[in-house]
Amino acid sequence: MARSIALIAHSSRSDIYSSILSFKKYMKAAGIEVVDARAHADLSRTELIAVFGGDGTILWAAERARGLRKPILGINYGHVGFLAEVDRDSLRNVADAIIAREWSVDERMTVDLTVEYPTGKTVCGWALNEAAIAKAPPSRMIGVDVAVDGHGVSSFKTDGILISTPTGSTGYNFSAGGPIVWPDVQAMVLVPVAAHALFTRPMVVAPNSVLTVRISEDTAAVTCDGRRTLPLARGSVLSVTRGSENVRLARLNDAPFSERLVAKFQLPVTGWRVQGGDES
């Protein structure tokens, strides 16, 4: 059977375009068809989705792969590129690994969202990184009631709330003061943003918990992965649970998460003792 992979790329980058041409030529010589995921509706016969771009493009690919269970292989042409597997300089190695089918799959937890409006209408969504609740212009602070598994935890006013997955913990969550969570830890993280209350610390809850946020004052909106936005009128209730479908990331090496963390954030670790040696 003929082999094929899908490709998604940041569309406005000339350097990416030239890399794609070389990549397609190399794959074609190996007998592998590369199809444009933006133009092809049916990706069911592709082996994986190769993504040329940054984390935003990979999040778009996760949306495109929804329901297909295709692994996503990110080649970083962005800035930090935390979701990407390799940098652009390793493109030939990526092609060789695809040809040889030498990749593993990392299953990443998602979250499912349900918004219940005061009118009785219900709308659903999902996120790989985070669901970000923010005040809606020209609103000032929004009032929220937070509950875990049906039990009230706190009520306060805030600019917003983040509910993140372990994958999203290194993104907006981290910038807002939330903890970094290793991707093999199954959990959800709730982080208030610029809250006006005494108890506004981040919370880490079990993956089978139900996080509930009720908008008690003013209006807001919830945005999933920076891509899909739902309005939140006063009285709306947002419920967040573990996602019914994981996102599958293709991996080409077994480097531990701590190594990726140090490399991506350029963390200072020169003083760490290695194999019993002295600190330097």
Image (cartoon, grey):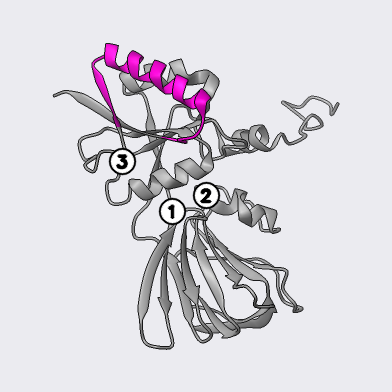
Image quarter where the C terminus lies is: top right
Residue that carries the numbered disc 2 in the rendered image: 167
Q: Residue at x 17, y 23 (%)?
A: 2
Residue position marked by numbered label 1 in the rendering: 109
Q: Is residue 271 above or below residue 18?
A: below
State the separation of the CA atoms marked 1 and 2: 8 Å
Question: Residue 70, which numbered label?
Answer: 3
**Disc 1 secondary structure class:** loop
> What is the x, y in percent for residue 130?
52, 58
Q: Residue furthest left?
A: 1
Give amino acid for label 1: Met
Label 2: how many residues lie within 10 Å, few (<14), some (14-19) or many (20+)?
Answer: many
Up the image or down, 183 lies above or below 233; here it is above
Residue 168 point in image, percent of width and height: 55, 52
Residues shaded magenta: 9-35
Q: Is residue 29 left or right of residue 138?
A: left
Q: Are marks 1 and 2 in contact (CB under 8 Å)?
A: yes
Q: Residue at x 46, y 20 (%)?
A: 19
* Residue 266 in view: yes
Q: Is residue 95 left or right of residue 54?
A: left
Is 193 drawn above or below residue 80 in the view shown? below
Amino acid residing under circle 2: Thr
Residue 211 seen in render: no
Q: Which class describes the residues within 10 Å of circle 3: few (<14), some (14-19), or many (20+)? A: many
Q: Earlier in the sequence, mark 3 or mark 1?
A: 3
Q: Which of marks 2 and 1 precedes in the sequence?
A: 1
Quarter-wise, where is residue 135 in the image? bottom right
